[in-house]
Image (tube, grey):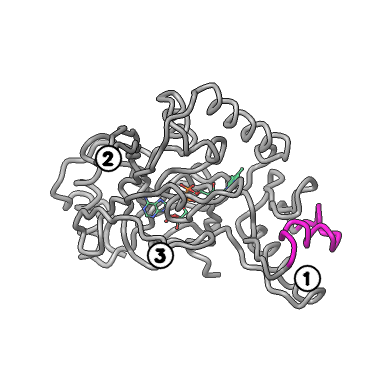
Amino acid sequence: MADLRFLMEMIPVPFTGDLAYDEPMSRHTTFRVGGPADLWVRPRGEGFPEFAAALLGTARSRGVPVFILGGGANLVIADRGIRGIVLDTSGWTGWEFGEGTGGDRYVKVRSGTAVDAAAEAAAAAGLSGMEFLAGMPGSAGGAVWMNARCYERSVSDLLTETGILDEALKPLALPFDAADFGYKKSPFQNREILILSAQFTLKPRPPEEIYREMADHRRDRKEKGHYRFPSAGSAFKNNRAFGKPTGKIIDELGLRGFAVGGAAVAPFHGNIIINTGTATAADIRALTEELILRVEAALNITLEPEILFTGDWSC
Ligand SMILES: Cc1cc2nc3c(=O)[nH]c(=O)nc-3n(C[C@H](O)[C@H](O)[C@H](O)COP(=O)(O)OP(=O)(O)OC[C@H]3O[C@@H](n4cnc5c(N)ncnc54)[C@H](O)[C@@H]3O)c2cc1C
């Protein structure tokens, strides 16, 4: 691996932000697991796009991999950490409201902004559309990448444009095309791009109604135990072909509370894996694999993980 201190010095753009070598990724994931990134970089301020492009270009020219981190809310990062650079987008925040040619309203959100904060901003402006995202952890960039879904709505239902740095490190505005998106699927999952912004269509609605709906979602998540333990939300995708939600399938096999080391199926929800306090990433991975095997053995169906395993899993 190239010398990362030297690589940082080679970047031809001034750096403002936070940076650490051997930074524990457990500090940056909602599961609270993950070993050290060789280099973790969180650029801040207006220079983010320019610095990110220079960092990505320099790393590429030296053969150094770069992992893009949003809110870390859907990740299991290996105990051995991540080789290369983690580019943390959480310093690239903010939004602006606008009006389209047909008079329709929108908000353009920088990718590192927490979706909950963006929903709150839309509510304060009396604009509706993002209510379903209130209380969901993670960033706008991560929500677009994942095509996050809750309360019967997906991010693709309101996305109108995505600003990216493409593979050639060129900034591009990609108009939304429904054909590219599906259940928890976005076109960005197959591309090496950086999402810089997401534009969401919104409609005027009385703020008290927006706030009421957001409060309902936050309360519902709290009552379902979402914030009780470190987790990454649903561990597995749902699949209509299974005939019932994945959580119910796991419940009915009596696997609530089933544990491997410090990782356990939440005692209150079959499709949430929790860190009971001492979990390693290896525990979470072993539990995920064991659940797949047990469901396969009992029902002959294969669960697909929604949580993403990344980093250095070599032994
Ligand atoms: C308590 C809890 C509840 C949850 N509930 C839900 C739910 O109801 N519905 C749901 O869909 N999810 C849910 N999740 C999972 C998580 O919130 C979402 O998947 C979220 O969209 C992840 O966003 P993130 O910014 O944390 O992405 P990360 O976890 O940081 O990254 C996810 C992927 O996106 C990529 N990525 C992130 N940002 C960018 C960017 N700017 N450019 C390019 N690639 C990027 C990363 O490289 C990675 O591959 C929940 C999680 C928790 C902890």
Location of residue 167 (image quadrant): bottom left
Compare residues 134 and 206 and report the one nearer the observer.
206
Q: Which mark is nearer the camera, 2 or 1?
A: 2
Span of residues in magenta: 243-259
Amino acid at dot 3: Asp
Left or right side of 212 for 176: left
For residue 23, side relative to residue 280 (left or right): left
Q: Are marks 1 and 3 in contact (CB under 8 Å)?
A: no
Dot 2 alpha-carbon crowd within 10 angstroms: few under 14, some 14 to 19, many 20 or more = few
Residue in the image at 71% along x and 60% along y: 246
Q: Residue furthest front?
A: 102
Query: Which residue position holds label 3?
Result: 180
User: What whole-number distance in Å separates the C-alpha atoms at marks 3 and 2?
Assistant: 23 Å
Please state which amino acid type lies under the numbered disc 1: Arg
Element type at marker 2? loop
Q: CA distance from mark 1 to mark 3?
A: 33 Å
**Up-down: is 283 above or below 124?**
below
Along the line of sight, the residue nearer the viewer: 41 or 177: 177
- Return the x and y of residue 236 as percentages of the image width and height: 64, 60
Residue carrying label 1: 294
